[in-house]
Amino acid sequence: MTLLIQKIDEALAQLSMPLTPAQVQCGWTKNAKIAAIQYLTEVRENSRSAVPYDIVRTLDSCGVFGGDLHCRIAEISNLADTTS
């Protein structure tokens, strides 16, 4: 298993859990979770080039502005960019 796939699986596991109060306070919503899950699933199943948008920008537009989960997904996005 590559580092990218491992990090995606960890983030997907975290996204499968209910939002915590801290995540909600950082702007996470059900729609933001759905966008993140779709992005991570596409990256995992395909190549990064198959994903048509920047997830960090998408999360920003959803109102997500920080927290551990946001940082984890940004790290995955950067890692995916360097491995494609």
Image (cartoon, rainbow, N blue to C red):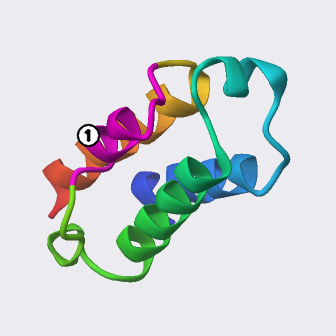
Q: Quadrant of residue 47?
A: bottom left
Quadrant into which the C terminus falls: bottom left
Q: Residue at x 40, y 75 (%)?
A: 42
As for residue 55 lying within the magenta part, the answer is yes
Observer-nearest of 30 and 48:
30
Observer-nearest of 48 and 2:
48
Q: What residue is pinned by disc 1?
A: 57
Q: Can residue 82 be seen in the rendering of this structure?
A: yes
Observer-nearest of 9 and 40:
40
Q: Residue at x 38, y 45 (%)?
A: 76
Asked if residue 14 lies left or right of residue 29, the reply is: right
As for residue 57 lying within the magenta part, the answer is yes
Q: Can residue 2 be seen in the rendering of this structure?
A: no
Asked if residue 6 lies left or right of residue 46, the reply is: right
Looking at the picture, which amino acid does disc 1 mark? Arg
Q: Is residue 72 above or below residue 79?
A: above
Q: Residue at x 64, y 57 (%)?
A: 12
Q: Quadrant of residue 25?
A: top right
Which span is picked out in magenta? 54-65
Categorize mark 1 by other alpha carbons within 10 Å: few (<14), some (14-19), many (20+).
few
Q: Residue at x 65, y 50 (%)?
A: 10
Q: Is residue 27 above or below residue 41?
A: above
Residue 7 at what x, y percent from top left? 52, 49
